[in-house]
Image: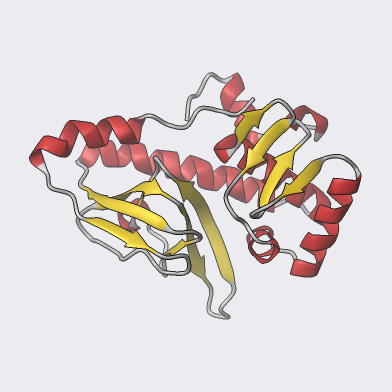
Amino acid sequence: MVSERPLFYGQHATAIAPIYEPQSLCLRAGQAVPHQSDYLWYLEKGVVRTLTWNEEGDLVTLGLWSAGDCIGQLLSEVTPFQMECLSPVEVRSLPVSGPELGVLIRSHLRYMEELFSIISYKRAPQRLLRFLDWLGDRFGRQVEQGRIIDLGLTHQLLAEITGITRVTATRLLNEFEREGKLMRLPKQQFLLQFSASQLGGVTSLALHRAKGIRN
């Protein structure tokens, strides 16, 4: 079952709206969301990837975020740090106080831990399939046939995030489709036709749900 998206951000934004005039931006895919030292960005539309890179230029994805999430340098101690638009994006500025910032930081850390635990799997098929399952839980839309991921993720981006080559990502997606695990739809959408229970073991999201933790 697809988990519900957090309601905290939207409620918080509404609560502070009367005392703050937000700055709004519309950005294109490929553009970077600008850094701000005194407030966050509330994501109203689109998909953003937070990332860093090492001295050799290798990219490391820190998280994927969509409508209803907050992003910004204030939520990370990682340097360098960049927020890359993966689709057309609309954001507005959002100031936060100390307690709210702490809640948001913990939420970001939890999602990063989940993502890194998936990337740690040694076998590429297991890693990619669990990543798709994570995307389905975090961003998916439940339909009768399964879960639809509508983030416009390319094979190259899936490869970058999971640490495999684009050729390997394409080959594995073809295999998953032949096995009936997923179906590729127009506009780079995926229909996941498997559940976490079919992967074996317990996913991090399943652990959170079992403990009654709501994202």
Q: 12 and 210: which one is in front?
A: 12
Residue found 46% across the figure and 44% down from its top? 109
**Where in the figure is residue 148, as x and y percent of width and height?**
65, 39
Residue found 74% across the figure and 64% down from its top? 164
Q: Quadrant of residue 195?
A: top right
- Residue 123 seen in this snapshot: no
Q: 120 and 94: which one is in front?
A: 94
- Left/right of residue 210 with respect to residue 18 in the rendered view: right
In the image, is residue 151 above or below residue 4?
A: below
Q: Quadrant of residue 16?
A: top left
In the image, is residue 91 above or below residue 206?
A: below
- Residue 19 seen in this snapshot: yes
**Where in the figure is residue 48, as x and y percent of width and height?**
46, 56
Q: 25 and 121: which one is in front?
A: 25
- Total labels: the figure holds 0
- Left/right of residue 91 with respect to residue 66 in the rendered view: left
> In the picture, which quadrant includes the N terminus?
top right
- Left/right of residue 206 with respect to residue 91 in the rendered view: right
